[in-house]
Image (cartoon, rainbow, N blue to C red):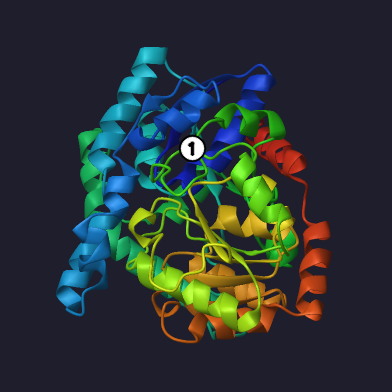
Amino acid sequence: MRHVMALVGSRGDVQPALAVALELRRRGHDVVTGVAPNLVPLAERLGLDPVPLGIDSAALLGSDLVRRDMRSAHPVRRVRALRAVAAAGWDELRTGLLALLDDVGGADTVVTGLLGQEVAAAVAERRGLGMAALHYCPVRANRVVSPVSGVRGPGATRAVWGLGERVRWDLTRRAENAQRAELGLGATRVHLPTRLRDAGAVEIQAYDPVLVPGLADEWGPRRPFTGFLALDDDARARLGEAGSGPDAEPGAALDAGLDAGLEGWLDDGDPPVYVGFGSMPVADPPALLAAVDAACAELGVRALVSAGWNDFSAAGGADGVDEKRVRVVGAVDHAAVLPRCRAAVHHGGAGTTGAVLRAGLPAVVGWYSADQPMWGDLLRGAGVGVARRASTLAQPGVLAGALSEVLDDATAARAAALGSRLVPADRAVAAAADAIGDIGR
């Protein structure tokens, strides 16, 4: 079978699907990989011969549209920004995906992540192809997990999801029908979840069912649960050579393993708290670094700060920061680093959440938007984490207070126990490959 992967968004949106692409290829499937242009080097290192698809996700996340307009106090500007971001890059994705399908002579299945599903589904419909989507968190109506903090009970939870789906459809309906018109398809009045269900699409739930008990039973076989997806050791080794020092390029590939300087720092003291926000934009790196240093001084701990897609180079010499107590690095290999830490402060992206849980660490989720508050709530409900809005973490005492709630023996024991119950990464990847390979059979 031939599968065309249409993977856009940040590294957290793309990398889990690349693990599945490698497994499908290992099984003998023909896999054609299209990824966001800025993530082509990542997929190249894995040997997937990627094609750039859509728009640069780092540029979008760093744009005024995301950093300023989506956070505007003016409601009209904010709604316009939400509508623009929801459909950002759709034209480029449509034209690129059509060209890719033509170049390879067609396919059996289009596989996408959470972002770009609307376009991928329309292209699959136009070409008569199977469709699979990888979901890294609950995004369909259900009675188990609320998308809004504080909502309790099956009826209220389902009602909130219904409202959210209507809001999403209002934001994207015009853009979706514009894409359909470009493809020669008729306009639709039915939102995407219903269309995917009616088309028999498979929506793979690429996160662990232990965190959402009862949801697998509610959704059934068309939304199979696999567990968190992650690259295996060989794939991580191939990623190689992005430096783990403070001057590593934002957005660079991870370093598979630890360099000698970081290895020595980890050995020269107690296990640190990991602090990293991945592709999320840190508004004021020096202020955050000062807050991390203050929290470490107050609580008697060390911290390893990973810059991710942010530039922390100017923050390295922030006044009063003890560089022996707080070490700033670039992108790092979570699988190599997190097991040597005692807790994590992160943005609550699904990939980082899964890595932190697998390492058995309690967490402070400093959330920005999207699914991140949901993950914060789920970790809090499991007794292994707390959640704060990311913008508050640099305020005096906030980070120290949050960390003090998770740096205790009882929370550490619960986190370790939860980590031992997760589906192993190799089984999760295999289950996702099984689900995709079964489409059309």
Q: Quadrant of residue 435?
A: top right
Counting labels gives 1
Disc 1: CA contacts within 10 A as few (<14), some (14-19) or many (>=20) = many
Q: Nearer the viewer, residue 354 or 403?
A: 403
x, y percentage for residue 21? 58, 29
Tell me if residue 82 can be seen: no
Q: Is residue 406 above or below residue 421?
A: below
Say which residue label 1 marks: 253
Q: Is residue 257 above or below residue 307?
A: above
Q: Nearer the viewer, residue 26 or 247?
A: 247
x, y percentage for residue 188? 30, 50
Dot 1: what SS?
A: loop
Q: Is residue 92 above or below residue 295?
A: above
Label 1 sits on what residue type? Ala
Q: Quadrant of residue 235?
A: top right
In which quadrant will I find the N terminus? top right
x, y percentage for residue 119? 34, 41
Who's the residue at 21% across and 45% down the image? 178
Who's the residue at 78% across and 46% down the image? 424
Q: Is residue 135 left or right of residue 224?
A: left
In which quadrant will I find the C terminus? top right
Q: Is residue 205 left or right of residue 125?
A: right
x, y percentage for residue 407? 70, 77
Q: Is residue 330 left or right of residue 317?
A: right
Tell me if residue 26 can be seen: yes
Q: Nearer the viewer, residue 245 or 320?
A: 320
Q: Is residue 133 left or right of residue 368?
A: right
Who's the residue at 22% across and 67% down the image? 68
Q: Quadrant of residue 52?
A: top left
Q: Nearer the viewer, residue 119 or 47?
A: 47
